[in-house]
Image (cartoon, rainbow, N blue to C red):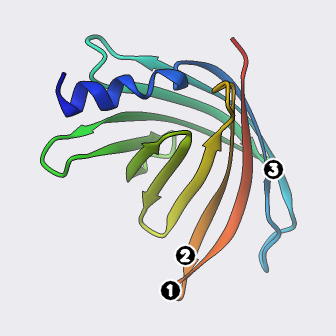
């Protein structure tokens, strides 16, 4: 097996439907808000890419996006590109190390971990400001199927 196929195969625990809940921390601009979402992960043909669809309510705002996760053979890392309903695109580097899941983007990152049975993913999204990272949103994804 190649690095690409081995790494992509390791993402199999994501496949399925997840119920997501979270708390967006209060800031100077807004009070604490609740986030609820449905996350659906499925393989694209050939299992070389993982498709992730998100339908979320963050406070009063509806957020919908589609993300594609794959292997960058030149950089030898997982990447994702997210496309949202507002026409914005975000790019990330990702890593699954054992049960630990990391996502790193421009000024935003996630640090999370799956439980022993791969049925729950708990994590914290952080935002960067002035060179330091601060918690932005705690999340819990629970597998529904």
Residue drawn at x 45%, y 42% as measured from the top left: 96
- Percent across and percent down for residue 136 are 69, 65
Residue toward you, 59 or 72? 72
Label 2 crowd bin: few (<14), some (14–19), many (20+), radius 10 Å: some
Precedes in sequence: disc 1 or disc 3: 3
State which quadrant residue 47 falls in: top left
Residue located beneath label 1 in the image: 131
What's the distance in space between the residues labelled 1 and 3, CA to CA? 27 Å
Question: How many dots with numbers?
Answer: 3
Q: Secondary structure at mark 3?
A: loop
Vertical placement of residue 52 versus 45, above or below: below
Residues at marks 2 and 3, CA–CA distance in whole angstroms: 21 Å
Tell me the mark number nearer the camera, choosing from 1 and 3.
1
Q: Which mark is residue 128?
A: 2
Is 111 displayed left or right of 97 in the figure? right
Q: Nearer the viewer, residue 91 or 2?
A: 2
Neighbour tally class for label 3: few under 14, some 14-19, many 20 plus, Cα within 10 Å: some
Which residue occupies 69% across, 68% down? 135
Residue shown at the point (46%, 17%) measured from the top left = 42
Q: Is residue 87 left or right of residue 145?
A: left
The secondary structure type at the circle numbered 2 is: strand
Residue farthest along the bottom direction in this orientation: 130
Where is mark 3, residue-wise?
59
């Amino acid at each position: 097996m190649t690095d690409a196929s081995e790494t992509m195969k390791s993402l199999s625990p994501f496949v399925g439907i997840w119920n997501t809940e979270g708390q967006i921390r209060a800031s100077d601009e807004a009070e604490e808000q609740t986030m609820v979402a449905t996350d659906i992960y499925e393989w694209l043909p050939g299992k070389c890419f993982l498709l992730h669809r998100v339908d979320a309510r963050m406070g009063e705002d509806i957020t919908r996006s589609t993300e594609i996760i794959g292997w960058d053979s030149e950089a030898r890392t997982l990447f994702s590109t997210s496309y949202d309903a507002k026409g914005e695109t975000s790019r990330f580097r990702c890593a699954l190390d054992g049960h630990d899941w990391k996502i790193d983007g421009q000024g935003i990152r996630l640090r999370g971990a799956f439980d022993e049975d791969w049925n729950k993913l708990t994590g914290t999204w952080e935002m960067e400001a002035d060179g330091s990272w601060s918690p932005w949103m705690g999340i819990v994804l629970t597998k529904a199927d």
